[in-house]
């Protein structure tokens, strides 16, 4: 099995690892009347809904 002769620098390692994270996170509309933008699998900060259930106190 091939083994690298020298250790890669931290900057080169981080440059390589950052390449696959090229797209922005997905955003969905919350079912509340204001249609706030919410990331998937997160609670709406305005109304407190998650998967159609009230989990936090909203406005």
Image (cartoon, helix red, strand yellow):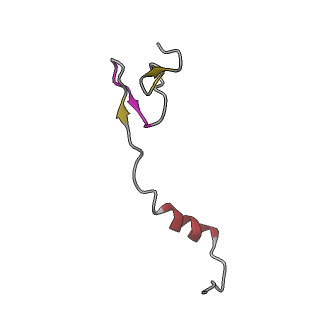
Q: Nearer the viewer, residue 50 or 45?
A: 50
**Which residue is located at x 42 percent, y 45 percent?**
25
Q: Nearer the viewer, residue 15 or 2?
A: 2
Estimate the x, y position of residue 34 in percent, counting from the top left.
Answer: 34, 19
**Residue 17 sits inside the magenta stretch:** no
Question: In which image quadrant can residue 32 be found?
Answer: top left
Estimate the x, y position of residue 15 in percent, counting from the top left.
Answer: 52, 66
Residue furthest out toward the top = 59
Query: In the figure, 26 relative to 58: above or below?
Result: below
**Which residue is located at x 57 percent, y 71 percent?**
12
Estimate the x, y position of residue 35 in percent, counting from the top left.
Answer: 33, 24
Query: In the figure, 56 relative to 19: above or below?
Result: above
For the image, the number of numbered tags is 0
Question: In which image quadrant can residue 52 be found?
Answer: top left
Magenta residues (range): 34-40
**Which residue is located at x 53 percent, y 64 percent?**
17
Quadrant for the N terminus in the image: bottom right
Query: In the figure, 13 relative to 5: above or below?
Result: above
Magenta stretch: helix, strand or loop mostly: loop
**Which residue is located at x 43 percent, y 28 percent?**
51
């Amino acid at each position: 099995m091939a083994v690298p002769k020298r250790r890669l620098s931290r900057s080169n390692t981080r440059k390589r690892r950052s390449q696959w994270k090229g797209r922005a996170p997905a955003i969905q509309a919350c079912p509340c009347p204001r249609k706030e933008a919410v990331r998937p699998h997160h609670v709406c900060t305005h109304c407190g809904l998650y998967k159609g259930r009230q989990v936090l106190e909203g406005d």
